[in-house]
């Protein structure tokens, strides 16, 4: 790995893993995909690294099959049992419930809206989002607007549903 | 300009528009209440979506774990080569967040009220002028156009003050102060007060105007009981309690012409005051978000049984609701990457809590921090809505790290100066310190 790639790795790996974790809900899988992304960057160093890395990572997510997801979840469970420090049980339960609601709400979005939202959360500007997702820059605002509105509506709908059920 | 679409508003909030576009949008928002309402909704979705996505942190120790995990995985690929990192130049510390001024968008009821307000005073003026005309006609011995009390008009008795030259009705078009002075020439104490009022700055707040109205009340207390109704109308600007508490001693009836002139002068003065208030309102229309929020709240929850507020009534605005950024005293939201750049290492977090957001705060807002540099502030909120602030600043050689007064946790972790404070007690903060990773 050249010095440039090493710098890229240090600079973008955490953000890439975080975005992939938000996208997949699986930490091990996110790390695997991030590793694979950088492996591809080694073979074909990108000119504009950030959009390139995230675009490749999102492509890998799409290509990845359901079997990998299942395997990753098993690994995640194992990992949880092994080395995760245990916060207070109440805090953990509440956080897990909320996280599940957010994740489910995110799952209701279409692919493009979800990815635009996740890239924006990583600090991408509209030019970078457009370059990563192959959108026109003028369409990014509309895409993000739709994504944010649908995410919040879906999340609130779940909250209401749970309250009614309980 | 057509209505603003949602995408444009999101681009505005994301800071993706050119300054010329921003100005156009601001101008449009000044004239379109529908778009103003939409902007508020969009801001709500924007902030909520941001919070939801931000809550999806990596399991375990959050951001720090992410960075740590990545490094352990990196080691499996290749021994990590330390790259000499030049600390990123710190951004200048602004005095506060850049203000975004958005124009006022009064709703239809507010616009109607503003439209009707001058008409009310105009009607009062016409009434007063008409009464003055009738009175002057009756004094000259000509039959009045409307029935009038013969006891007042048929045998006019000029008092000492009436014997002095009085301006005719044409003077009604002049300054209200002139009329007021002539109408009250027999009251020496009224002179300076009136003069002071006539020099009142046009930017006098409404509350001050109301106070000056109260002071006038004493001058006008000698009005005849026949004019009490008119006085009551003018007093509609005062709170009901104040009206009740103002004693109005029974005064002997004065000759009607004098009372009418006084009333006409008062009406003109009220009109002048209303115009001044309108100019002041226009000049001081600083349209901040808090005010719009208050107005929106007031519209959404119309108070049943609330008294109708007249235009010149002192506006008792509730204290504006502070945003989370204002409560946390941060001037800029940042992401994990920026926080890591600021600190030269991954940001520390409180284990088991999901941060609301991270931001930069001025150094002087964090006890013990270097005031010339910003601090990275991770903001949490407990179940009661109280904020917990975890401040972090990269230490510089020689920087003082002694604990601060107040019992708030203040310590160092490696090269990072940590300070934990917020809206909860120091005991709880000390407990939370043990969970900082």
Image: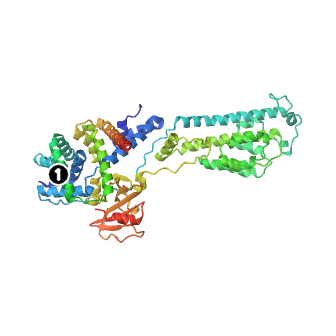
Is residue B11 visible to the viewer in this orientation of the structure?
Answer: no
Residue B436 is drawn in which quadrant?
A: bottom left
Quarter of the figure that contains the N terminus of chain B: top left
Residue B340 is drawn in which quadrant?
A: bottom left
Q: Does residue B226 appear left or right of residue B313 in this picture?
A: right
Q: Does residue B345 appear left or right of residue B106 in this picture?
A: left
Residue B129 is drawn in which quadrant?
A: top right
How far across and down, in percent of the image, does residue B317 sit? 55, 48
How far across and down, in percent of the image, does residue B171 sit? 74, 37
Quarter of the figure that contains the C terminus of chain B: bottom left
How far across and down, in percent of the image, does residue B261 sit? 77, 39
The residue identified by callout 1 is A75
| SS under mark 1 | helix
Q: Residue at x 89, y 36 (%)?
A: B155
**Near-viewer residue (A20 or B374):** A20
B340 to B266, vertically: above or below: below
How far across and down, in percent of the image, does residue B343 sit? 28, 60
Residue sitting farthest toward the left: A43
Is residue A159 visible to the viewer in this orientation of the structure?
Answer: yes
**Near-viewer residue (B153 or B421):** B421
Q: Does residue B123 appear left or right of residue A55 in this picture?
A: right
Q: Does residue B266 appear left or right of residue A86 in this picture?
A: right
Chain bearing tag 1 is A
């Amino acid at each position: 790995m050249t010095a440039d790639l090493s710098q890229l790795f240090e600079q973008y790996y955490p953000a890439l893993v975080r975005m992939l974790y938000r996208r997949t809900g699986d930490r091990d899988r996110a790390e695997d995909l991030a590793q694979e992304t950088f492996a591809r960057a080694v073979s074909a160093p990108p000119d504009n690294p950030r959009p390139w890395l995230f675009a490749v990572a999102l492509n890998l997510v799409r290509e990845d099959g359901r079997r990998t997801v299942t395997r990753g979840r098993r690994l995640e469970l194992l990992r949880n049992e092994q080395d995760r420090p245990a916060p207070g049980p109440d805090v953990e339960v509440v956080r897990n419930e909320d996280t599940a609601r957010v994740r489910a709400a995110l799952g209701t979005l279409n692919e493009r809206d979800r990815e635009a939202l996740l890239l924006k959360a990583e600090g991408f500007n509209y030019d970078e989002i457009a370059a990563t997702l192959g959108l026109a820059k003028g369409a990014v605002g509309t895409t993000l607007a739709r994504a944010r509105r649908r995410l919040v509506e879906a999340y609130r709908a779940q909250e209401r549903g749970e309250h009614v059920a309980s | 300009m057509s209505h603003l679409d949602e995408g444009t508003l999101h681009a505005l909030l994301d800071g993706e528009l050119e300054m010329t576009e921003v100005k156009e949008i601001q101008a449009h928002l000044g004239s379109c209440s529908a778009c103003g309402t939409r902007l508020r909704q969009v801001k709500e979705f924007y902030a909520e979506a941001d919070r939801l996505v931000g809550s999806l942190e990596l399991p375990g120790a959050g951001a720090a774990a992410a960075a740590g995990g990545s490094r352990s995985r990196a080691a499996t690929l290749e021994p990590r080569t330390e790259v000499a990192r030049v600390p990123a130049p710190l951004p200048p510390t602004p005095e506060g967040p850049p203000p975004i001024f958005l124009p006022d968008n009064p709703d239809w009821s507010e616009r109607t009220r503003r439209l009707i307000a001058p008409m009310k005073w105009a009607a009062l003026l016409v009434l007063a002028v008409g009464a003055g005309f009738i009175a002057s006609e009756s004094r000259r011995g000509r039959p009045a156009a409307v029935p009038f009390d013969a006891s007042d008009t048929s045998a006019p008795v000029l008092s000492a003050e009436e014997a002095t030259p009085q301006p005719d009705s044409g003077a009604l078009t002049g300054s209200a102060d002139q009329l007021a002075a002539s109408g009250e020439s027999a009251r020496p104490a009224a002179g300076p007060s009136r003069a002071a009022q006539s020099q009142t700055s046009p930017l006098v707040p409404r509350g001050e105007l109301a106070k000056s109205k109260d002071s006038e009340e004493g001058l006008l207390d000698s009005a005849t009981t026949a004019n009490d109704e008119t006085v009551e109308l003018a007093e509609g600007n005062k709170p009901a309690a104040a009206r009740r508490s103002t004693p109005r001693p029974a005064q002997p009836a004065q000759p009607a012409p004098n009372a009418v002139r006084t009333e006409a002068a008062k009406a003109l003065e009220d009109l002048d005051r209303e115009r001044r208030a309108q100019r002041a309102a226009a000049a001081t229309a600083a349209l901040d978000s808090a005010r719009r929020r208050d107005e929106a709240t007031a519209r959404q929850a119309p108070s049943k049984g609330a008294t109708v507020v007249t235009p010149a009534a002192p506006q008792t605005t509730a204290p504006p609701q502070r945003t989370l950024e204002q409560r946390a005293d941060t001037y800029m939201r940042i992401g994990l990457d920026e926080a890591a750049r600021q600190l030269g290492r991954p940001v520390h977090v409180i284990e088991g809590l999901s941060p609301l957001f991270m931001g930069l705060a001025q150094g002087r807002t964090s006890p013990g921090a270097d005031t010339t540099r910003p601090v990275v502030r991770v903001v949490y909120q407990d179940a009661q809505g109280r904020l917990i602030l975890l401040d972090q600043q990269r230490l510089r050689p020689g920087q003082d790290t002694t604990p601060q007064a107040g019992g708030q946790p203040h310590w160092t972790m490696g090269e990072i100066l940590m300070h934990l404070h917020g809206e909860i007690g120091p005991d709880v903060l000390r407990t939370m310190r043990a969970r900082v990773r």
